Image (spheres, rainbow, N blue to C red):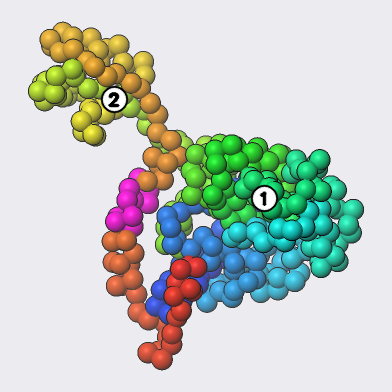
Amino acid sequence: MSAIITQGLTKRFGDLVAVDRLNLDIPEGGVVGFVGPNGSGKSTTIRMLLGLINPSAGSGEVLGAPISKPAAYAHRVGALIESPSFVPSLSARANLRSLAALRGLPTTRVAEVVDTVGLSGRERDLVKTYSLGMKQRLAIAAALLPDPELLILDEPTNGLDPAGIVEVRILLQELGAQGRTLLVSSHLLSEIEAACSQVVIIRFGEMLFSGPLAELMVRTTAHVKVAPEHEQDAVRLAELYAARGWGFRQANGDLVVEARASDAPELNRVAALGGITLRKLSAYEDTLEDVFLEMTGATDGDNALFRSRRRAKRQPLFSQHASVTDKEVDDA
């Protein structure tokens, strides 16, 4: 069964195509990472899924109900969009009780969600005394009030320190293990790699990958970074490795050799036989971030160039009288 399905989902703001014919099929259960460069349409996609904005074209379903009728599934979905808002002079418990009352939910859920997010014992403290990590936990608790089958979280670790990020990561893993479906948008790829079993990558609204994280990580390769003690030996070292059939590239003064960690002794031996002493010999494997940058562009300049070329090929959808606000473009 699928928690989210979209077909040709598209959103335009004037001549800006924020989401471009997106086809999603997100299975039920587990944590799904939703990633892409800044301005790729992640938040716009989430807003369409929640019924906050209407698509320009295409269709979608959330928990089996069409996104054109969000009232049919809203009670089964919890969401954290942007920075959560709470009354700082009230306790966490009082804030959650107010939110439950507004949604017509039983107040018994308050104690349950406080326990779920690990705030038991601190729920009577004023929110203004909370750390950023605790506030994020409280925000997730608010999203859990309706006991949702699907949680949609937009940048849940934004602004957190390393300890807070780890806290939220563990919480997300626990929620996914309960059988809930979590769609998590984040720019912290190390956290996506640590917490998610599925990943969706988009670039300016276009799908680049959707599937199991393990399937994506098959694209990774092993490398060994090598550097000679004397810089003038770098060219000779490269020739020695090339003669043995090893591919390589230059990166920040190092030779990055396409080799496995088990090849490191031979790399050292070849250098020594050539009269070259190494000052660096370190093996590593690509991470999700490496794969992501290869797919989406290594710099913001790469992405800006891609977007400008892409927009130049588009024809405006509306007439010259149509307008689009700065906020709409930023949200895209």
**Image height check: is 145 above or below 72?**
above
Q: Amino acid at mark 1?
A: Lys
Residue in the foreground of this view, choosing between 126 and 38 = 126
The crowding category of the residue bearing disc 2, from other C-alpha atoms within 10 Å (few below 14, some 14 to 19, many at least 20), is many
Q: Amino acid at mark 2?
A: Lys
Number of marks drawn: 2
Residue identifier under label 1: 135
1 or 2: tag closer to the N-terminus: 1
Q: Secondary structure at mark 1?
A: helix
**Image height check: is 213 above or below 16?**
above
Residue identifier under label 2: 225
- The part of the image, by quadrant, that contains residue 227 is top left
Distance (Cα) linking label 1 and label 2: 42 Å
In percent of width and height, residue 215 lies at 50, 39
The crowding category of the residue bearing disc 1, from other C-alpha atoms within 10 Å (few below 14, some 14 to 19, many at least 20), is many
Q: Residue furthest bottom?
A: 321
In percent of width and height, residue 256 lies at 26, 29
Q: For the magenta stretch, what is the residue range?
A: 294-303
Magenta residues, dominant SS class: helix
- The part of the image, by quadrant, that contains residue 218 is top left
Q: Is residue 253 left or right of residue 193?
A: left
Q: Are marks 1 and 2 in contact (CB under 8 Å)?
A: no
